[in-house]
Image (spheres, rainbow, N blue to C red):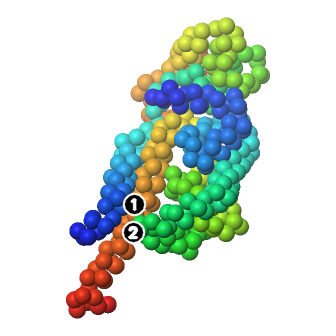
Amino acid sequence: MIAEWSQTALALVPEWGGWLILSVTFLSCLAFPLPASLVMLAGGAFTASGDLSLIVVAGAALLGAVAGDQVGYALSRAGGGPLWQRLAARPGTGALMTRAVSDLARRDLLAVFLSRWLFSALGPYVNLAAGMTRLDWTRFTIAGVAGEAVWVSIYVGLGYAFAAQIDEIGAAMANVAGGLGASAVALVLGRMLWRAAREERDDSGTKGEDGA
Amino acid sequence: MRRLWANHRKLVIAFAVMVVLAAGFLIRGFVLVPPRGDPTRPVAAWMTPGFVVHTYHIPPEVVGEILGLTPGEHRRQTIAEIATAQGAIVTDLLAELQAEVDARRPPGLPQGDPPPGPPPDGGE
C-alpha cells in the first residue's frame, strides 16, 4: 500500500512534470528531506506510460541534482571556512576530522562520485565538506556530474522498466540507500577510531618494549 | 580500548549507532520490503489513463470510455483530476476501472503475467 504522502507526490509528477522533478532533486541535494528517489521512479514510470518525455524527465532530474550540488558546494565554500577552522581546532576529534578530510581530498573523485549514487544519503554533506575544505571545483564538478548521471539513470531506468512497482521499489531503495549511507559513515568513524586506538597503543608501547 | 572510550566517547557511540542503523536499514531493504510485483495492486487516483493502460494492459479505448475521454485524446491528468474536471466521483471511476482490471486479470494468474490472448469481452 502506498502511504498518503507518496500518493500526493506521485499525483504531482504527471501534472508538473519536469519542473517538479528538477525542484525535488535540486532541494534534495541541499539536504531537504524530499522523496527524490520516488519522484524519479515516478518520472520513469510516467515516461513508460507515454505521459512524460524521457529526455525531459532525465534532463530535469540531472539538471536539478547538479545545480543542487553546485549551490551546496558554493555556499559552503563561501561561508564554511570559519566553521571548518573551528571544527579542526577542537581538541581530540579535530585532529581525527582533519585526517578524515585529508583522506577525502586524496580520494576526492571517488568520494564525490560514489556519494552521488551508491552512498547518496551522504551527498549533501560531502558537498558541504568539499566546499568547506576547498576541494578543487573542476574535480568536484566532473565527479559530481558523472555520479548524478548514474543516480538519475538508476532511478529513472527502474521506474521506466518496473512502472507497476514504483512504490515498492521506492520503499526498498530508500531503505537500502539509508543502510549504505549509514555503512559509509560507520566505515569513516571506524577508521577514525582505529587510528586513535593504534596511536594510543603506540603511546603506551613506547613506555614498554614495543616501541614500533 | 578503555582509553578509547574515555577519550572518544561520542565517536564510539556514533560508530555503534551507525552500525545498528546500517544493519536495520539493509535488513529492511533487502528482507522486509523487497518488491513483490503484486498483480492485485488496486488502481489509484494518482494514476493517469496512460499509466492504467500501460500497467494493467487494458486497451486505451476502454480506459478512455470509463473516464469519459474523447477517442484519441491523451491526457496527462491523473484520474483524480479528470474526476474533478468532469464533476464525477473519483471512487466511482476507480471502481469501474478496477472492475475492468479484475475482469481481465482473474485471480490465480501467475504473478506479474499479462492476461493471455485477447480480452474476453472483445473490448475494441
Q: Which residue is mark 1?
A: A186
Residue shown at the point (30%, 77%) measured from the top left: A200
Quadrant of residue A35 in the image? top right
Q: Say what secondary structure mark 2 lies in.
A: loop
- Number of callouts: 2
Q: Say what secondary structure mark 1 lies in.
A: helix
Percent x, y of residue A69: 65, 54
Percent x, y of residue A27: 63, 43
Chain under disc 1: A
Task: Using a 10 Å C-alpha cutoff, classify the residue at mark 1 as few (fewer than 14 neighbours), some (14 to 19) or many (20 or more).
Answer: many
Residue B65 image label: none
Quadrant of residue A36 in the image? top right
Name the amino acid, label 1: Ala
Residue B83 vertical placement versus A188 (above, below):
above
Residue A87 appearing in the image:
yes
Percent x, y of residue A121: 51, 51
Residue B75 vertical placement versus A180 (above, below):
above
Residue shown at the point (55%, 28%) measured from the top left: A7
Residue A92 image label: 2
Q: Between tags 1 and 2, which lies in front?
A: 2
Q: Are marks 1 and 2 in contact (CB under 8 Å)?
A: no
Percent x, y of residue A182: 42, 54
Name the amino acid, label 2: Gly
- Residue B79 placement, left or right of A1: right
Chain under disc 2: A
